[in-house]
Image (cartoon, grey):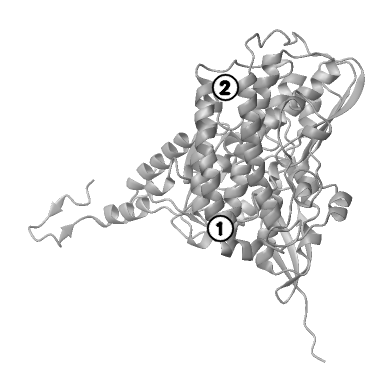
Amino acid sequence: MLKTEQMVLNMGPQHPSTHGVLRLELELEGEIIVNVKPHLGYLHRCFEKHCEAMTYPQIIPYVDRLDYLASMNNEMGYAIAVERLLDIKVPERVEYIRVIMAELQRIASHMVAVGTYGIDIGAFTPFLYLFRDRERILTLFEKTCGARLLYNYIWVGGLSHDLPINFVNETRDFLNDFKKTVIEVNNLLSYNKIFIERTANVGVLNVESAINYGITGPNLRASGLKWDIRRNDPYSIYDRFDFEIPVGEGLHGQVGDCWDRYYLRVQEMIQSIRIVEQALDQLPEGEITSALPKRIKPVEGQLYSRVENPKGELGYFIVSKGQLQPFRVKVRPPSFINLSVLGELCKGHLIADVIAILGSIDIVLGEVDR
Amino acid sequence: MGLLDKEFSDDNIVISKVDDLLNWARLSSLWQMSFGLACCAIEMMATSASHYDFDRFGVIPRPSPRQADIIIISGTVTLKMATRIKRLYEQMADPKYIISMGSCSNCGGPYWEHGYHVLKGVDRVIPVDVYVPGCPPRPEALLEGLLTLQEKIRNESLVKKSV
């Protein structure tokens, strides 16, 4: 009888479609994937080691650099965790500005996810359209705090700066323009026949294994479970806004395939637009610095606090020994845990599908390796 | 710029120096290896995308080191990654150039003090031509870095080793 040998193929760490410095060890039977082993650690930046040496406010810049596509969300999660530890309440205006920033950042993060996913599959134009609009979000952030990517904007107990003049009008203008871009992207990419052929029925993740692997965020919702921490365990002022939680419906294939995971991000951008619009309407006048503590020195204790990041559930486990530095800050990174399902999703598919599946999981290596 | 200085009345003949011709060709189409490491890679992508448009300067991404002219080290270089970067650099064909983008690859950046895992500057494994400061540098800063590199290539010579 004729027998074939299994072949091992290395993908990465330098590969344009691994979204960073991830190395995948593929075991192949011909062109069919038998097993995928991700190798991590090429971007390990010892976040926990830094936290041992830094004071609470000094950690915020390092928090920025975890998931560098969603710095505002990371900062917000960290600030909320330390505020719960200190038991302080921030002014209304700060809460509203935080929500506006976090949702704009969610849109920006999903723009990169959707745009680069198009490139992975072979469509270059949506990337250009989305980055054109992403620049406008970054300009809004830059006017607010001076930085384009890593902000150090949301501080424990407040913000570093108030909103600039005319921010509300400029944001409204952007949102109105962006609604048209979403339609354009849908026509260019989402309903494109070639795109659907490449992504529908590929890498199907059912709800049971999604829960068993600890998948959160858009990947879990695409599998059909309505689970969003903004709704299920509300933090900040998210209970005041009216928004829907989209779930995967399997419009072009099965529920939880790559197309569902991709399209869910498009739908989430629309919901984020709604939240920002409501927050801009309700934005109160007031002080932003009144709750900023002079010295951050929580009493002994520990807590786990979680927020909904664009990638999933971002949790901070902080242990305080009553000093200026935390004893330990452990991060529960959504990307790292979402990546763990890759091996199961890829089994039985072709090599080219690995790219499609990896792109649809939407990982950021800064957060995977920390 | 020196290349088209001397022209005969017949437009098809141009006299130039070999150095000028080679340098002009080299600096006008620097193909960049599409290789992102960390946060700076997002700014590098933004530079290549619609608003800043790296393509204006002849820079387009190539996924293979064998076909690339420049490599932009964009992000934190860990010790584990350093050996891979060295190998990628060695796989590139001459002439090859390196732009070190951001504080991390310049000197270790925010991970300099406590980073047991970070290479304190990518110039410890490969020779860097242009350093772009910032954490992360703005796209304009990266464009400036590229223009500086083009200026450097313009002054190169086949016979004399450039400084």
Which residue has dot 1 on it?
A: B90
Count of residue discs: 2
Label 2: which secondary element: helix
Residue for point 65% across, 66% down: A352
Q: CA distance from mark 2 to mark 1?
A: 41 Å
In the rendered image, residue A202, in percent from the top left (x then y), is placed at 71, 63
Q: Residue under label 2, please give it.
A: A145
The residue lying furthest to the bottom in this view is A1
- Crowding at label 1, few (<14), some or many (≥20) Cα neighbours within 10 Å? some
Q: Horizontal placement of A3 versus A185: left or right?
A: right
Q: Residue furthest left?
A: B9
Q: Is residue B100 visible?
A: no
Question: Is A143 placed above or below A116 here?
Answer: above
- At label 1, the amino acid type is Glu
Asked whether B68 or B136 is in front, the reply is B136
**Does residue A70 appear anywhere in the picture?**
yes
For residue A217, above or below residue A353: above
Chain of the residue where label 1 is placed in the rendered structure: B
